[in-house]
Every structure is written in structure tokens, then in C-alpha cells.
Image (tube, rainbow, N blue to C red):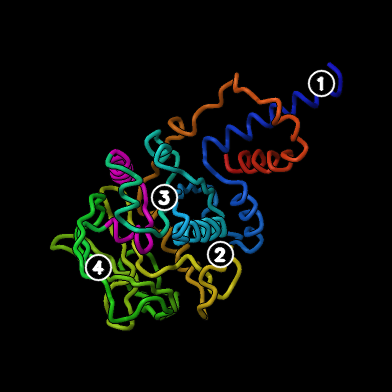
Amino acid sequence: MSKFSSSIALLVVGLVVGLAFFQATGTSTQYIMESEQIHIGAQSSNDLTNISVALYESYYSSTDLRISESRGALYNMLTWMNATVNIINQTDILDGALWAHELLVIPEGLGPWIERNIGDEGMQMIRDWLSAGGSYIGVRGSAAMAVTDSYFEGSNTTFALGLFNGTSLGMADLGHTLMTDVEINRDCTGPDLSDMPETMSTLFRTGRYFVADPGQEMIVIARYTYNDLPAMIATHYGEGTVFLSSPHFEYEENGDLDGTDYMDRYDDPDTEWALMLRITQWLLEDSPTVLNASTWPIPIASDLPIPMEMLLVAGGLGGVVIVAILVFVKKR
């Protein structure tokens, strides 16, 4: 075989592996490139290395940036922690994607819309996976969605996901969007927060506090200094663990680490990422490992077709494919 033919063959193999990887994980090129940059400032030890995180794609809206911006900030936060992050959608969940991950993170969004997007079967798969030892992180809308009942902006809503038996209640008297302080529970019975700051400034956006039903475990992680009510909580679901936060912890309002300027107009003197790393480590350590990668990603087909028009732009895609392959090999 000539050198030219060998090069073409290697290129085709690279395209097959790269495309199949993207198809299986749903990870975007943009996010991969961001993760490479963000690792410069990541923790060098005691982080989430070798931990697989499923970041839910959620629903799309051309007028509501809260989902895409929250998802991007969460991706950068998790890669700062050195986690392996895959963007998944509803189809991936139904195909068994959760069993290839130890943690599910759902970005901000309207709770009823997120539930509708996941669907009844998808929510049951989340509950089954959590019961076996998975871990869940929700923020604002995806936190409220995990609570059975809601009283917010004058209306009652019942959610079906049901990870926490209780009620989330709106706090209209605090305001719409602002920075507010929370008091860290350094004596909490969950993660060891004894060396965390006494208070942190967090982004509040028409948020809530949490009330547990009788018999429901509620580990208070942080309380609003405004009214001493729970702002961030944790609990167990079967063998799994759950963390819910109404304030936004994912945004770095005074920095560029989060990869977005969405909330940069607000002044935040500190970061919540170190706190989130500690909480996430506890979520994982306090639950069994549920990895069963034989169910997902979808195996690479040996006869995957490569359109000729893609070969014509192979020079432009080569760098992207190489990045995908390197990330894939490193993570596995």
C-alpha cells in the first residue's frame, strides 16, 4: 500500500472513531476545547479524576439563555474539577447512558419543561440508577424539579421525579436577581465543610428555600443569611445521593473560568467551586459505584459509512478529530 493510501486509511479510521465518539457521547467540539483550556487552572490532586459525569443537555430555547449558559458554566466547573464530562440527552438516558456515569448534573431551566423533556420513562431510569448508587446535582429549576411539591410565584406545582419529599417555596420578598450571602453549615452531617468560609456570596434568581416532609432526611449545606432558611441541601435516595441548590453556584461572576459572561454584570467577591468540589466528592464517596459501561456508549460499527464530502475537508477536521481521540483515550 502506498504512503498516500496508508494516510487516507488512517484518516478514515480517525474520522470513524472521532465521529462515533461524538455520536455516542453527545460532547460538542466547543466544550472539548473549553475543557482543554480550563484544565490549566484545575486542581492538581484530590479532584474528580477518573469520575464520569453525565451533564444533561436539557431543552432548547432560542429566547431563554438560562439553559445553555448554565450548561456551559457547569461543564467548565466540572472539567475544572478534572472530571470526565459527557453531554447526554433523553435518548441517551433511555439507551442506558446513566450506567456509564457516576454523577448526573442537570442545568438550570423551568422544572416542568425539564420533566417534560426527560419524560416518564427517563425519570424512572434516573430513579432506578440513583437507587443503585448514582448521584444527582440540581440547580435552581432542576433542584426544584427534584422536590415533590412547589409553591412559587403564587402557584402550586407537583413534580414527578420525587427525589426529595418536601416543598420548595419561593422568596419573592428577597428580590428578582441579585447576589446574596449564604451561611455554610460547617457542622453538617454530610460533607466535611469545617474548613470552608463561614459565608459565601451566591447568585439568587427568584430562588427558593426547602422544607422537608416528616421522615424525609434533609442535610442542610447552607442557609440564606437573609432569613436563616435552607438554600442548599443534600439527601440520600436509596443507595444514591442528591444535592440541591436554589442559588447558582456554577457562575464565576468576576472571572472567566466559567466560560460565559452571562452573569458578569454582578459582583461576586468569592467562588463556590471549591465548595462544590467538596460536596461532589462526598456525594460520590457516600454512594456505591454504579458504572456499567457495557450498556453505553453504543459500540462502534465496523462498517460505519464515511461520506466522501467529509474526506474532502479532512484537513480542516483533523485537529478536531485528534482532540476527540486523545480525550477519549485519556478518559478511558
Residue occupying the point 61% across, 54% down: 35
Q: Along the polypeptide, which appears first: circle 4 or circle 3?
A: 3
**Depth order, front residue of 94/184:** 94
In the image, which is nearer the foreground, mark 1 or mark 3? Answer: 3
Q: Which mark is residue 5?
A: 1
Q: Is residue 27 visible?
A: yes
Q: Position of residue 159 (x, y in %)?
A: 23, 54
Residue extending furthest toward the left: 214
Instruction: Give the answer, above or below, for where 247 lies relative to 129.
Output: below
Residue occupying the point 52% across, 35% down: 24
In the image, which is nearer the foreground, mark 3 or mark 2? Answer: 3
Which residue was labeled with disc 3? 59
Q: Which residues are magenta?
A: 121-146
Residue extending furthest toward the front: 63
Q: Along the polypeptide, which appears first: circle 4 or circle 1?
A: 1
* Most frequent secondary structure within the magenta stretch: helix
Q: Along the polypeptide, which appears first: circle 3 or circle 2?
A: 3
Mark 4: which amino acid? Phe
Which residue was labeled with disc 4? 152
Residue extending furthest toward the top: 1
Which residue was labeled with disc 2? 258
Tell me if mark 1 has few (under 14), some (14-19) or many (20+) residues whose alpha carbon lies within 10 angstroms of its own: few
Which image quarter is the N terminus in? top right
Which image quarter is the C terminus in? top right
